[in-house]
């Protein structure tokens, strides 16, 4: 037998023995066809980052997103990479860098389209439209564009909620207040059913802003009271500070100075308690200007 043939026989025998060993160990559980350990860790980081954003802790959110990005790259998962870019764009936008946020959302759109992630690509385009709306773009064009993108999204309810939120804001800009509240309540319904308490509080805050612009102050306070209920349930201190400050603004417009003073003081106390000095100063300025 040649050396070459000997190697082949030896190699084949090793493969057979290896296979037989696994077959003999019938107690070994079947291995999963796909592992999700790192991807689940990335999902957790994204959730934590979004929570920090809701709390107004933008620097901590970016730290969470740095880790989410590292993990997503390590497993080369396009969907997670896109979601990280979308979330980072939000943080950057809240920090005042509109151009930087737009670049991140554009990169997310390109990555999603390249990877064939149709719904994520639609979501990225919705984020871009939201940025355009907040920068003064034609509200009706934004509403129509987002409506088209919503028809693409079938699975992710939270993406759908974002779409309805943008439509609601566009309707508000168009002074179609009834339609704006209908759209925002569609987002609210999704968040309430999923127990996304902070998001539901945010929905009521936006509904309050629509009612305030429409001049319905009593209904605005009702909406802010609902926002406060959800933000208390979520222990969302940042949201609570913003809710009470907005309530102070509404009371002031309505001529109820006593209630305005109490609301501003409550907002000030909350922001001081969580060491958000800039927000505390903003509430204090409103208080002293009464």
Image: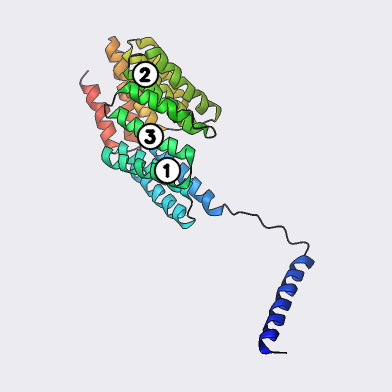
**Observer able to see residue 95:** yes
The residue closer to the viewer here, 201 or 114, is 114
The residue closer to the viewer here, 109 or 35, is 109
Residue 5, percent across and down?
Answer: 69, 84
Q: Residue at x 30, y 31 (%)?
A: 132
The quarter holding residue 101 reads: top left
Task: Report the Cα–Cα distance between label 2 and label 1.
Answer: 29 Å
Find disc 2 in the rendering and name its residue.
171
In the image: residue 25, left or right of residue 33: right
* Residue furthest out toward the left: 289
Mark 2 is surrounded, within 10 Å at the Cα level, by few (under 14), some (14 to 19) or many (20 or more) other residues, namely: many
Marks 2 & 1, CB-CB < 8 Å contact: no
Q: Nearer the viewer, mark 1 or mark 3?
A: 3
Task: Report the Cα–Cα distance between label 1 and label 3.
Answer: 17 Å
Q: Secondary structure at mark 2?
A: helix
Q: Nearer the viewer, mark 2 or mark 1?
A: 2
Task: Report the Cα–Cα distance between label 2 and label 3.
Answer: 16 Å
Quadrant showing the N terminus: bottom right
Quadrant showing the C terminus: top left
Q: Residue at x 22, y 26 (%)?
A: 285
Residue 246, percent across and down?
Answer: 33, 21
Q: How is the image coloured?
A: rainbow
Above or below for 233 versus 1: above
Find disc 3 in the rendering and name its residue.
127
Q: Earlier in the sequence, mark 1 or mark 3?
A: 1
Residue 75, percent across and down?
Answer: 49, 56
Q: Secondary structure at mark 1?
A: helix
Q: Which mark is residue 49?
A: 1
């Amino acid at each position: 037998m040649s050396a070459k043939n000997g190697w082949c026989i030896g190699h084949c025998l090793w493969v057979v023995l290896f296979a037989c060993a696994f077959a003999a160990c019938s107690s070994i559980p079947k291995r999963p066809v796909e592992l999700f350990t790192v991807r689940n860790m990335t999902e957790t980081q994204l959730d934590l980052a979004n929570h920090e954003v809701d709390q107004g802790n933008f620097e901590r959110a970016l730290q969470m997103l740095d880790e989410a990005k590292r993990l997503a790259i390590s497993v080369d998962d396009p969907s997670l990479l896109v979601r990280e870019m979308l979330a980072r764009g939000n943080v950057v936008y809240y920090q005042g860098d509109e151009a930087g946020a737009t670049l991140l959302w554009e990169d997310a759109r390109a990555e999603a389209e390249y990877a064939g992630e149709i719904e994520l690509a639609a979501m990225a385009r919705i984020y871009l439209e939201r940025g355009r709306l907040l920068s003064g773009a034609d509200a009706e064009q934004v509403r129509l564009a987002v409506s088209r993108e919503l028809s693409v999204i079938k699975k992710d309810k939270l993406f759908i909620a974002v779409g309805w939120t943008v439509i609601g804001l566009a309707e508000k800009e168009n002074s179609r207040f009834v339609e704006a509240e209908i759209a925002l309540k569609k987002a609210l319904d999704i968040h309430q059913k999923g127990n996304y308490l902070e998001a539901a509080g945010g929905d009521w805050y936006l509904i309050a802003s629509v009612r305030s612009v429409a001049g319905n102050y009593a209904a605005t306070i009702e909406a802010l009271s609902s926002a406060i209920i959800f933000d208390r349930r979520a222990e969302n201190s940042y949201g609570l500070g913003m809710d009470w400050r907005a309530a102070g603004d509404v009371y002031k417009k309505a001529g109820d100075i006593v209630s305005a003073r109490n609301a501003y003081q409550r907002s000030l106390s909350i922001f001081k308690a969580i060491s958000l000095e800039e927000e505390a100063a903003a509430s204090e300025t409103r208080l002293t200007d009464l």
